[in-house]
Image (spheres, rainbow, N blue to C red):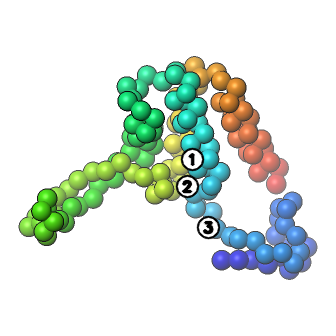
Amino acid sequence: MKILVTSEHEFTGADLKIGRYYSVVPADTPTENQNRCWHSLLLEYWNSGCHSYNAKSYPHFRELIKLYLGAGVEKYRDLVDAEGKPAAVPVVRYRLKSWRDYTKQERTSAIQNLINEMLQAGVQTKKFYDILTQLETNNVNKMAG
């Protein structure tokens, strides 16, 4: 969906210009900023060594964080057996929810949980504080309008 700003004060925002087109996404759509923030925080937590997860690798660590601090697992029904044939009785299984499938609210909660745990674990790296400062700056700018 696209919108066109047709007159002054029709839409608010410092960057909106009359005669320009802007892409619009529903307010509950996860954002690219959330994606960058999540992955930056995860990598910084891993690199800091302040975590107590018994992870074998960074991908394993990422899965553990999503399990414990994120949306966790989702239930699904397996309609095919091990041989690839239709199952007589569907089997209920669980899988780790993919970050790609998180809602905006689930992403917000996961990021907040991760930041809280990083603070409790004693992460004090410059990169971590830079990320927090950027988040605070973005929130102040949003509130200011």
Where is residue 120 drawn, in percent x and y?
54, 22
- Badge 2 crowding class, 10 Å Cα cut-off, few under 14, some 14 to 19, many 20 or more, is some
* Distance from Cα at disc 3 to Cα at disc 1: 16 Å
Q: Secondary structure at mark 2?
A: helix
The one nearer the camera, 46 or 70, is 46
Residue at the spot 74% in from the left edge and 77% down from the top edge: 3
Quadrant of residue 63 in the image? top left
Left or right: where 69 falls relative to 29 = left
Disc 1 element: helix
Q: Residue at x 29, y 55 (%)?
A: 75
| Residue behind mark 2 | 104
Residue drawn at x 23%, y 61% as measured from the top left: 77
Does the rendering let one see residue 145? yes
Q: Amino acid at mark 3?
A: Pro
Residue 116 visible, this orientation: no
Q: Are marks 1 and 2 in contact (CB under 8 Å)?
A: yes
Q: Quadrant of the N terminus?
A: bottom right
Which residue is label 1 attached to? 108
Residue type, numbered disc 2: Lys
x and y percentages locating residue 21 in the rendered image: 78, 75
**Residue 80 appears at what percent x and percent y?**
17, 65
Q: Quadrant of the C terminus?
A: bottom right
State yes or no: discs 3 and 1 in contact (Cβ < 8 Å): no
- Rendered position, 105 above or below 49: below
Circle 3 SS class:
loop
The percent coordinates of residue 8 (x first, y second) are 91, 73
**Mark closer to the chain start, 3 or 1:** 3
* Residue wearing tag 3: 26
Decide: few, some or many residues near mark 1? Use Cα within 10 Å; few <14, some 14-19, many ≥20. Answer: some
Q: Left or right? Give the position of 68 relative to 124.
A: left
